[in-house]
Image: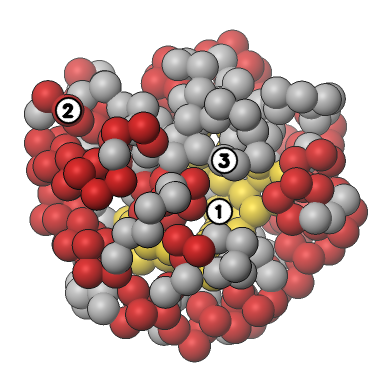
C-alpha cells in the first residue's frame, strides 16, 4: 500500500495542491499500484496538509481495480470518511504511553477505548477496516512495549472483529532479529492472523527487516514513494521504506509486484520538485 500522500505529506511544511496530488495518484495507478492511502481525516489546524480531504476524494478516478483508503483516529473521522464516500479506513494507536500522549493526547487506556469506538463505528458503517499498533519495535525515548502487551492488544482487536492488523515500526527501530522474534510469537498465538507491516527506515534497517518478515508469508507492506515521510513526534524519524527500493528488492528475490518502478520514481521526482528533497530518504528514485 502506497502511503506517501498521507504518512509522507503530514510532516511537509509546503502545501501540496489537490490537483498535484491527483496527478500523482493517477500516475501511481498507471505504474501498477492498486492500494493507496490518500489522506487522513484529522483536525486541519493540527495537520494543515490534510485540510482538503473531501475535495481530494471527490476528485479520485473511479477504478474497480484500485482501493483508496484514509486514516482516522476518532468518531468524527469515521463520520467524515462515510460522508466522503471512501470505503476503507485505517486506524491505529501506540503501545507506547508517551507516544500516545504526543500523538493523541491520551494515555494507553484512553487511546484503546477510542480505538474500539472507531472500529465498531467503521464496521457498523460497512467500511473495510484495518487497525494498527504503533511503536511495536520500540521508541527512541523511554520504555518499549512488552510482548505480552502486544499480544493482549492484538487479541482485543481480533475480538472486535478486525480482519487485518498492521504492525508499525514507527520509530524505525526494528531489526531482522526483533522482527522475526515478534512475528514468530504472534503467529504462534494467532496462526490465522492477517498482518500488514508498516516499516520506517530511520536507521536504515527497513529493507533487511522486511526480507526476514517475508519468511512469515506477509502479504501486505506499506511503502512510501521516494521514502518520503516521518513522524513529527520522534526526532530524526524517516519515512516508510521507499516504494522504489522495495520493488527492486522484491524483484531480486523473485517476487512479481506488477509495479513499474521507473513510473513510480517519475512521480516521486514530480513531488520532490514541489516540496524539495529534504523529506525523501529513498535511494533509487533519483536515478530511475
Residue 1 shows up from this direction = no
CB atoms of marks 3 and 1 within 8 Å: no
Q: Quadrant of residue 225?
A: top left
Observer-nearest of 175 and 213:
175
CB atoms of marks 2 and 3 within 8 Å: no
Instruction: Please report the residue visible at 55 percent of the width from the left and 53 percent of the height from the top.
Output: 164
| Above or below, 283 relative to 194 | above
Where in the figure is residue 147, as x and y percent of width and height?
Answer: 79, 28
| Quarter of the picture holding the C terminus | top left
Query: How far, Cα to Cα, is label 2 from label 1?
Result: 33 Å
Residue located beneath label 2 in the image: 286
Badge 1 density bin: few <14, some 14–19, many ≥20, Cα 10 Å? some
Instruction: Please report the residue visible at 18 percent of the width from the left and 40 percent of the height from the top.
Output: 269
Query: How far, Cα to Cα, is label 2 from label 3?
Result: 23 Å
Query: Horizontal placement of 253 versus 213: left or right?
Result: left
Where in the figure is residue 100, as x and y percent of width and height?
Answer: 77, 47
Q: Which mark is residue 231?
A: 3
Which badge, 3 or 1, comes first in the chain's sequence? Answer: 1
Give SS at disc 3.
Answer: loop
Instruction: Please report the residue visible at 37 percent of the width from the left and 59 percent of the height from the top.
Output: 15
Q: Quadrant of residue 258?
A: top left
Residue occupying the far front of the picture: 14
Residue located beneath label 1 in the image: 164
Instruction: Please report the residue visible at 51 percent of the width from the left and 78 percent of the height from the top.
Output: 81
CB atoms of marks 2 and 1 within 8 Å: no
Amino acid at each position: 500500500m502506497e502511503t506517501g500522500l498521507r504518512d509522507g505529506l503530514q510532516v511537509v511544511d509546503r502545501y501540496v495542491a489537490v490537483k498535484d496530488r491527483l496527478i500523482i495518484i493517477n500516475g501511481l495507478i498507471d505504474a501498477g499500484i492498486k492500494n493507496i492511502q490518500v489522506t487522513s481525516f484529522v483536525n486541519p489546524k493540527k495537520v494543515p496538509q490534510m485540510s482538503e480531504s473531501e475535495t481530494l476524494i471527490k476528485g479520485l478516478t473511479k477504478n474497480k481495480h484500485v482501493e483508496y483508503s484514509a486514516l482516522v483516529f476518532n468518531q468524527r473521522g469515521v463520520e467524515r470518511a462515510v460522508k466522503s464516500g471512501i470505503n476503507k479506513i485505517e486506524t491505529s494507536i501506540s503501545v507506547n504511553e508517551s507516544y500516545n500522549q504526543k500523538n493523541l493526547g491520551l494515555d494507553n487506556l484512553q487511546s484503546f477505548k477510542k480505538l474500539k469506538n472507531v472500529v465498531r463505528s467503521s464496521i457498523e458503517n460497512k467500511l473495510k477496516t484495518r487497525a494498527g499498533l504503533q511503536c511495536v519495535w520500540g521508541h527512541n525515548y523511554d520504555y518499549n512495549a512488552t510482548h505480552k502487551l502486544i499480544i493482549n492488544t492484538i487479541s482485543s482487536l481480533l475480538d472486535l472483529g478486525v480482519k487485518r492488523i498492521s504492525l508499525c515500526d514507527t520509530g524505525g527501530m526494528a531489526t531482522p532479529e526483533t522482527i522475526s522474534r515478534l512475528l514468530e510469537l504472534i503467529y504462534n498465538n494467532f496462526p490465522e492472523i492477517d498482518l500488514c507491516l508498516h516499516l520506517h527506515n530511520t536507521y536504515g534497517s527497513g529493507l533487511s527487516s522486511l526480507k526476514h518478515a517475508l519468511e512469515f508469508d506477509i502479504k501486505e507492506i506499506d511503502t512510501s514513494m521516494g521514502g518520503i515521510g516521518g513522524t513529527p513526534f520522534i526526532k530524526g524519524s524517516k519515512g516508510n521504506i521507499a516504494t522504489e527500493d522495495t520493488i527492486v528488492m522484491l524483484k531480486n528475490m523473485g517476487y512479481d509486484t506488477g509495479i513499474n518502478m521507473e513510473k513510480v520514481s517519475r512521480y516521486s521526482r514530480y513531488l520532490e520538485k514541489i516540496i524539495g528533497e529534504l523529506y525523501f530518504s529513498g535511494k533509487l528514485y533519483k536515478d530511475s
